[in-house]
Image: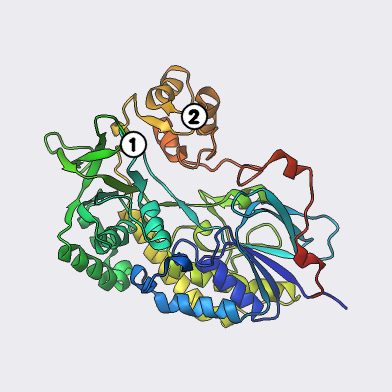
């Protein structure tokens, strides 16, 4: 008896869920692999059941969409959902009977990430999402300074807040739900500091029109909670208490038309929490290790969401930051395409026409947001010589500038070799954008063999997941 085709979907956020359900509905055996204890990703992050949240929907919008995905996953017998599985590598398998050759998905299981497993599949859908970009400034390493996404994750997943009074700052659409969510949870949000210029929205009105009611809703809630909105402003410095154990205030200043701090506009705002973010970047580690082509910092995919590596599809934020609606559309298309290709058929795009139309609209929307929410042009001028840029290796701005100006480094890799910036635990995911900015070059992902640290003992072992021993 010939086994049914097997698709491994990595990531259980909107794209991964949509892809897994679409493929499974067409007879494909699916293993959905995710690092979190529950499905949903960051966008649909849920509080643990033990916390007894009475109205978890209050922390979300598009709740009905999440309910449909959740219920569909629970009812779908063709999907095996592996939680707490941290994928560190995907590799092609030679000699596998699949039309694509087959793949081995290597993961570390459990909270301690010490129990290795391997899932074998005929094809792979990468729905690995994105991660937050935070550009450094003096004081950004103080306790109480958190990323905007981190503040949101604590609220959604743990029903906790980082402090009693907060400033939300940076740039990007994520700041709005973070500020309103914190305010609704009882935090006194002293200000929402956005570096973008409201006038920049005007040329993109058509592309953004569908989201204007949502934005108006956020604005109304900010007014209701008396949150000051400071557009075309930026954080200059975060100040700690006498012992440096906690942020106690933030200095912000206005930006001129060129993106520089305007002299004489600095103001100091008292707070015990600073939630700051400057957008998102795609997670491409697994795609890079497989040899998938990148378009800038995102995974390149065709109209079927196929990468240029046969048997590998990609969808969601990994192919470009665009939000949950775009991720759902791309995931659905990828799942249907993979199902058809694994069954030896050429897929009919008419079957996902609605998703393709949504994808086109949401990509236009995402492009408009990218144009509006760019960090200030001269943000690197706020990095002093004493500002820590690489937190893992404690590399300051002075060392990076010396590598560029004094030693002639002209790219991130050379700076890394000269200063150790990017050699730490995060492998440059946090400091990479800052190092690139100080170096004066484009951010280019560095190809890594592993997507996360792996115990040496794991590399010498082969642990096949129990699912591979079960009959199909």
Q: Position of residue 256 (x, y in %)?
A: 18, 42
Give residue 6's quadrant in the image: bottom right
Q: Position of residue 104 (x, y in %)?
A: 74, 56
Quarter that holds the N terminus: bottom right
| Left or right: where 259 falls relative to 419 | left
Frontmost residue, 182 versus 431: 182
Q: Position of residue 182 (x, y in %)?
A: 28, 59
Can residue 354 be seen here? The reply is yes
**Does 236 appear above or below 111?**
above
Frontmost residue, 105 versus 103: 105
| Left or right: where 288 falls relative to 432 | right
Report the residue marked by disc 2: 393
SS category of the residue bearing label 2: loop
Question: Do the CB atoms of the residues marked 1 and 2 lie less than 8 Å apart?
Answer: no
Quarter that holds the C terminus: bottom right
Frontmost residue, 239 versus 350: 239
**Does 429 appear above or below 229?**
above
Q: Which mark is residue 142?
A: 1
Whichever of callouts 1 and 2 sits on the residue coming sooner in the sequence is 1
| Left or right: where 471 falls relative to 310 | right
| Residue depicted at x 47% and y 21% | 408
Report crowding for label 1: few under 14, some 14 to 19, many 20 or more residues within 10 A (C-alpha).
some
Give the Cα separation between the discs numbered 1 and 2. 16 Å
Report crowding for label 2: few under 14, some 14 to 19, many 20 or more residues within 10 A (C-alpha).
some
| Residue depicted at x 59% and y 66% | 305
């Amino acid at each position: 008896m010939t086994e049914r085709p097997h698709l491994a979907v990595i990531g259980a956020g909107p794209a991964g869920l949509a892809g897994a359900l679409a493929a499974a509905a067409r007879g494909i055996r699916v293993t959905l692999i995710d690092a979190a204890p529950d499905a949903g990703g960051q966008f649909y992050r849920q509080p643990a059941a033990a916390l007894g949240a009475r109205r978890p929907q209050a922390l979300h919008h598009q709740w009905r969409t999440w309910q449909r995905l959740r219920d569909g996953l629970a009812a779908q017998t063709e999907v095996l959902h592996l939680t707490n599985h941290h994928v560190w590598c995907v590799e092609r398998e030679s000699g596998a009977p699949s039309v694509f050759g087959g793949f081995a998905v290597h993961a570390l299981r459990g909270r301690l990430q010490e129990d290795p497993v391997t899932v074998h599949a005929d094809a792979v859908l990468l729905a690995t999402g994105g991660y937050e970009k935070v550009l450094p400034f003096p004081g950004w390493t103080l306790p109480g300074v958190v990323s905007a996404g981190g503040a949101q994750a604590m609220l959604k997943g743990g029903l906790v807040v980082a402090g009693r009074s907060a400033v939300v700052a940076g740039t990007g659409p994520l700041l709005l739900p973070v500020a309103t969510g914190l305010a609704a949870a009882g935090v006194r949000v002293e200000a929402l500091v956005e570096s973008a210029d409201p006038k920049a929205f005007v040329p993109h009105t058509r592309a953004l029109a569908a989201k204007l009611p949502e934005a108006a809703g956020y604005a109304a809630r900010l007014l209701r909670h008396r949150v000051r909105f400071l557009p075309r402003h930026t954080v200059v410095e975060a100040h700690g208490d006498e012992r440096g154990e906690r942020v106690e205030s933030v200095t912000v200043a206005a930006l001129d038309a060129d993106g520089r701090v305007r002299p004489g506009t600095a103001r100091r705002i008292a707070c015990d929490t600073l939630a700051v973010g400057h957008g998102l970047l795609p997670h491409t580690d697994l795609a890079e290790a497989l040899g998938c082509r990148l378009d800038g910092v995102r995974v390149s995919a065709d109209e079927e969401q196929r990468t240029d590596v046969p048997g590998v599809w990609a969808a969601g934020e990994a192919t470009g930051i665009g939000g949950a609606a775009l991720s759902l559309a791309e995931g659905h298309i990828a799942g249907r395409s993979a199902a058809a290709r694994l069954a030896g058929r050429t897929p009919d795009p008419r079957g996902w026409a609605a998703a393709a139309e949504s994808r086109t609209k949401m990509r236009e929307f995402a492009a408009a947001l990218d144009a509006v929410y760019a960090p200030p042009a001269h943000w690197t001028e706020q990095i002093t010589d004493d500002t820590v840029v690489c937190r893992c290796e404690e590399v300051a701005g002075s060392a990076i500038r010396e590598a560029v100006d004094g030693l002639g480094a002209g790219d991130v890799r050379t700076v890394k070799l000269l200063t150790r910036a990017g050699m730490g635990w995060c492998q440059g995911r946090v400091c990479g954008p800052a190092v690139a900015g100080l170096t004066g070059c484009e951010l280019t992902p560095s190809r890594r063999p592993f997507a996360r640290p792996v115990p040496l003992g794991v590399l010498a072992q082969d642990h096949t997941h129990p699912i591979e021993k079960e009959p199909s």
